[in-house]
Image (cartoon, rainbow, N blue to C red):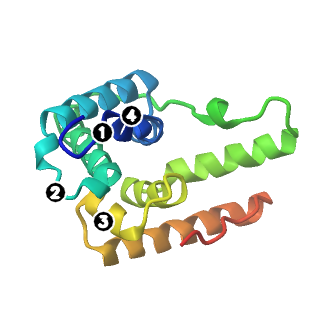
C-alpha cells in the first residue's frame, strides 16, 4: 500500500494504460516500455498524488508526459506505424464490419494527435472532459473544441464509407 493508494488501484489501470500507450506509441514494444516507465515513475512519486481519488487521471498524465518527452528526444528518428486493425478485427465476424472497422481506425489514425488523444480518452477510456484536461494539461474548453473538431472530421471522412457515425459520448 502506498499511503492511501493501493497496489490494486494502480494495477487495475494497467489495461487502460496499455491501450492508451499503444495509441500513442503505435508500436507494442514501445507501448509496453512506456507503461513500465509510467508505473516506475508513479511508484517513485506516489507522494505527489494530491487527491487519492484521481489515481487514474494521474497515471494517464504521467504516461502522456513521458510519451511527449520521449517524442521530443526521438523527433529525428523514423517511426513505423503499427497496424492495430488486427488487434480489433473479429476474424469470425462479418467481412463488411471488419472493413468498416478498418475504415474507422484509419480515419482515427489520420486525426491530428491532439484531437485523436482527446477523442480516445473520452470514447475509449471513458474519461470526463476535466480528466482529459488534466492529462493533456490544457483548459477544458480546449478539450471540448478538440473533441468537436475530431468528431466533425471523422463524420466527414466516414460519410461516404457507409460506416455508422460515432454517437456522441458525453
Residue designated by label 1: 6
In front of the other: 152 or 88:
88
Lower position in the chain sequence, tag 3 or tag 1: 1
In the image, residue 54 sits, relative to residue 24, either above or below, namely: below
Image-based side of 45 in relation to 138, left or right: left
Marks 1 and 4, how far apart at CA: 9 Å
For the residue carrying disc 1, how many other residues have a C-alpha within 10 Å: few (<14), some (14-19), or many (20+)?
few
Lower position in the chain sequence, tag 1 or tag 2: 1
In the image, residue 166 sits, relative to residue 108, either above or below, namely: below
In the image, residue 83 sits, relative to residue 46, either above or below, namely: above
Residue designated by label 4: 11
Residue at position x 44%, y 60% from top?
Answer: 127
Residue 124, position in %: x, y?
A: 54, 52
Lower position in the chain sequence, tag 3 or tag 4: 4
Location of residue 28 (image quadrant): top left
Q: SS at mark 3? A: helix
Amino acid at each position: 500500500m502506498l499511503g492511501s493508494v493501493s497496489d490494486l488501484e494502480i494495477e487495475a489501470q494497467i489495461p487502460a494504460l496499455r491501450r492508451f500507450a499503444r495509441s500513442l506509441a503505435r508500436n507494442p514494444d514501445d507501448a509496453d516500455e512506456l507503461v513500465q516507465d509510467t508505473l516506475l515513475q508513479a511508484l517513485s512519486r506516489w507522494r505527489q498524488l494530491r487527491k487519492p481519488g484521481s489515481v487514474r487521471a494521474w497515471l494517464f498524465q504521467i504516461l502522456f508526459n513521458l510519451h511527449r518527452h520521449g517524442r521530443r528526444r526521438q523527433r529525428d528518428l523514423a517511426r513505423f506505424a503499427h497496424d492495430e486493425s488486427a488487434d480489433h478485427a473479429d476474424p469470425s465476424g462479418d467481412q463488411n464490419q471488419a472493413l468498416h472497422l478498418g475504415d474507422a481506425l484509419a480515419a482515427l489514425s489520420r486525426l491530428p494527435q491532439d484531437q485523436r488523444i482527446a477523442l480516445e480518452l473520452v470514447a475509449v477510456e471513458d474519461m470526463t472532459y476535466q480528466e482529459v484536461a488534466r492529462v493533456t494539461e490544457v483548459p477544458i474548453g480546449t478539450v471540448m473544441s478538440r473533441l468537436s473538431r475530431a468528431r466533425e472530421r471523422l463524420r466527414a471522412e466516414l460519410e461516404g464509407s457507409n460506416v455508422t457515425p460515432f454517437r456522441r459520448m458525453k
